[in-house]
Amino acid sequence: MTVPMTPEQRKAIAYQLGDAKPATDALLGSLAESVANVRDHEHPKWEDLFCMNLSSYMGERMAPVLRRLLDIEVERDALRARVAELEALKPAPVQTCRTCGAGYDYGQPCSVCEFKKRMAAAIAAPVEKDTPAGESTPQAITVESYPDELSMLRGLLGVIRAVAKHGDMEEVRRLLAEHASDEQAAYAEVTS
């Protein structure tokens, strides 16, 4: 790999190029064709006017080629600097979930999405009421107003702790409103 030019070298070359515009693709194609012609034609033993003519033609058109090369090197260096800047970034401690929009701690799963998954699994899970043959089951004490009320509240509390820890009270309010709506729906299921 070649050593990059210094800013002073670039400035000097840009000054020497004056107001030359960057080479077009057509000019590059024409110069490539000239290079092939110089290389591939039969070279006479005496003065090679064909090569001298093509070399002169190419030399007269080098300012746009050098301008294009200089511009590309400047762009390359800017892109390298941007890549280095992006690689040095550290992720924010609180991320925004792309699924639900809630805040969560970097490196951890979104607690709102996890809560919703657990709720969906709890609602979909069958409740076994059968007892083994011949055994009697003591009457269970009902402490929940609807199935899985306690696990739903535990999940909500975990989510609120994570969100409130980062001071996002709007998100806490939104979660509480969503819980109230879910709870009303659960009560409605029980009473219907």
Image: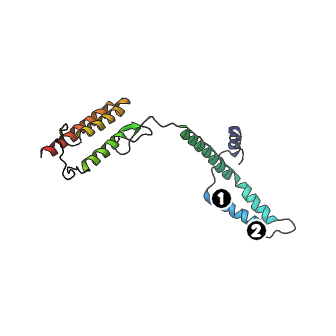
Tell which of 186 and 105 is nearer to you.
Answer: 186
Q: Position of residue 165 (x, y in %)?
A: 37, 30
Residue 9 placement: quadrant: top right
Tell which of 76 and 187 is nearer to you.
Answer: 187
Q: Is residue 167 shown above or below 24?
A: above
For image coordinates 71% across by 63% down, the residue present is 34
What element does badge 2 sit on? helix
Q: Position of residue 153 (x, y in %)?
A: 26, 36
For image coordinates 28% across by 44% down, the residue present is 119
- Is 28 left, or right, of 42 in this rendering? left
Q: Which mark is residue 40?
A: 2
Mark 2 surroundings: few (<14), some (14-19) or many (≥20) residues within 10 A: few
Q: Position of residue 66 (x, y in %)?
A: 68, 50
What element does badge 1 sit on? helix
Q: Which mark is residue 118?
A: none
Residue for badge 1: 28
